Image: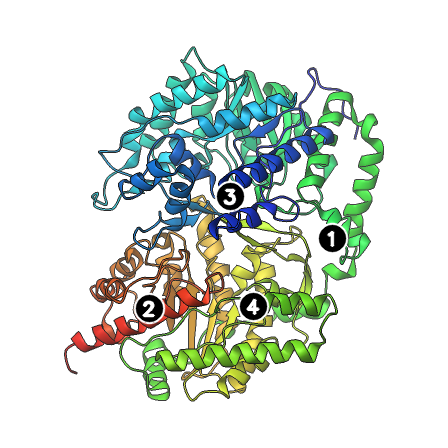
Amino acid sequence: MTTKPAAAAARATVYGYPRQGPNRELKKAIEGYWKGRVTADALRATAAELRRTNWRELADAGIDEVPTGDFSYYDHVLDTTVMVGAIPARHRATVDSDALDGYFAMARGTQDVAPLEMTKWFDTNYHYLVPELGPDTVFTADSAQQVTELKEALALGLSARPVLVGPVTYLLLSKPAPGVPADFDPLTLLDRLLPVYAEVLADLRAAGAEWVQLDEPALVQDRTPAELGAAARAYRGLGALTDRPKLLVASYFDRLGDALPVLAKAPVEGLALDFTEAASANLGDLAAVGGLPGKRLVAGVVSGRNVWVDDLAKSLSTLGTLLGLADRVDVSASSSLLHVPVDAALERDIEPQILRWLAFARQKTAEIVTLAKGLTQGTGTIAGELASNRADLASRANSPITRNPSVRARAAAVTDADTRRSQPYGERAAAQRAHLGLPLLPTTTIGSFPQTTELRTARADLRNGLIDTAGYEERIKAEIQEVVSFQEKTGLDVLVHGEAERNDMVQYFAEQLTGYLATRHGWVQSYGTRYVRPPILAGDITRPEPMTVRWTTYAQSLTDRPVKGMLTGPVTMLAWSFVRDDQPLGDTARQVALALRDEVNDLEAAGSSVIQVDEPALRETLPLRAADRPAYLDWATEAFRLSTSGVRPDTQIHTHMCYAEFGDIVQAIDDLDADVISLEAARSHMQVARELASHGYPREAGPGVYDIHSPRVPSTQEAAELLRAGLKAIPAERLWVNPDCGLKTRGWPETRASLENLVAAAHAVRGELPAS
């Protein structure tokens, strides 16, 4: 294929870049600040240097317009809350006293004040802090951060474009503040919010901004006529301003659909669209509205969310089609590169030929620059890059790693009976109660216990050859002994082994399954200073040997109380990995489910009576458009049942979900047919318990009473009050008592105190129950 040069030079740009630095310097500086080892000035200096380094690297790679405002100490939605002055009343005094400490208090809470609720950013594993708004909210502009970062980039001689969360998305992501009626609609505050955005835009123009990007990803979801009308009104108003930069309204993660004509007609100078997740739909819809005459189109043709090398020829074809649909076409990734690791070249443990299949943020930047050059100057100028790209794509497609005939044959032979328990829930529940003999309101934890410095050091020492396997395993045994002993003394009813041997709830399993690749430096931000290394799902999946049986059995040998076997479910194994893009997700999920089914069956055979298969990503992976959801939920729930349906009726299957909006998937939770589900509920004030009750959920549930994403220790009274609220929705014979999530990121002192209070709360509320 030969592409003629574009009429106007295509610019290369990105919407955002990984914040942490190649060695997670930002994480270390922030956590040092929290512990008092790093001063505020030193933290700010580290952050400024990371921003400068990112911008210089982008510019040196050939990016024509670098983003500013995408950097954050914790979360960009929280930054927007600060920018518009929507500080919750309970945090106002702290923010006024010290802006940085107040910022972190909103994110993490303090011992006396609860943080903002946290949930997933659309269908990603990134978490944002949910704004709390009400009819009395007063917005005030604070553009200091945005202006400062823009001036920093301009001082380097760079062309820079500030990136802001758009006003419509900000309000659509918000919730009613505590004490505000649940039916309050934050979107009714739009006319109050727009003047604040107008002030920020004026400040950015005065600071030198030519363009400002307003991100409106909420508009790729199904939106009512009223919501689309609000978007039209917002951009008519902002577009009519005279004292403003040019406006680029950006969408990503899916097709714009009915919102596209709204934005196409708006008096803004440019749109940014996703041409990876929704290429054909956005192309067709763009042609249907007559294109974007007189406007700039930023085409997201390189995936911002997955790590496979781009098909450059395919992207050039898409870009060529777009040339006739806008005044100018620029090239970008489909979303911020926040969602991928920094640099694939840092990976020394992946075979060089396989490494050529991968593109992290730096490699994606190079692809964007190459595509912009080819679009501007013609494909002849990038002939070498195209030839190399074709070879890499062919290498992956033809590799024996990607296809295992026996795995595919086993997956094809799965029947409906393989995805159903042998007895209905009512009969299983009776058998499990008789077998386990648990009290009302049984107490447990979600699975992981604190990963201490000693544990991490032991793991690093093993990896670096400083200790042998036997020495490492003795350290793990000692940790399991301590965790089991503490749980027994505290009075928990169903114990866990604490997962001391696990580096991550997905990576640990991926490293033991064929078909996965593990990275050494592939860190991606999940929330705040929490980074994960998503494994890469490259080929067909097999489980060569048991993965968890040894340590679970060892823990069970230390106690007479039941110890849960702990696994990560098939949907989460996909959602928190970089998945293969060469077959349907449902096919991959079935392969993972079969490997997990073998593990579940081996745990039961080894004596586990309670087995938890976590699926926190079930809601996260829900498609953004309602029309796409039934097919997803069919294969997702089937994969879970395939993993768990081979056990006896008296073996109790648990699952766990956290930090998501569960109301949309209550039926799917029911369809999992788990015996017990534990869910996050502390920050959302038992909302999920009410949602389960409204649905008529018939099984046992443990809505969390301890928010583990905050360092604060809930009092016995606080946990008891949450538990009483749970009892209003779920009867005592079906209610469990547990934290919101695993305790891996917490320290031992707060964990001990919190779990002691949790158990005390359960005992107190048990004493209030009527005698049976």
- Furthest toward the top, the residue is 242
Give the mark nearer the N terminus: 3 vs 2. 3
User: Which label sits on residue 347?
Assistant: 1
Badge 1 marks a residue whose secondary structure is loop
Q: Which mark is residue 39?
A: 3
Amino acid, disc 1: Glu
* Left or right: residue 78 compared with residue 438: right
Q: CA distance from mark 3 to mark 2?
A: 44 Å
Front in this rendered view, residue 585 or 465: 465
Q: Is the C-beta separation of discs 3 and 2 under 8 Å?
A: no
Sequence-earlier tag: 3 or 4: 3
Per the model, the C-alpha gap separating discs 3 and 1 is 33 Å
Asked if residue 438 can be seen in this view, the reply is yes
Asked which secondary structure carries label 3, the reply is: loop
Quadrant placement of the C terminus: bottom left
Image vertical order of residue 635 relative to residue 737, above or below: above
| Residue furthest to the left | 770
Q: Are marks 4 and 1 in contact (CB under 8 Å)?
A: no
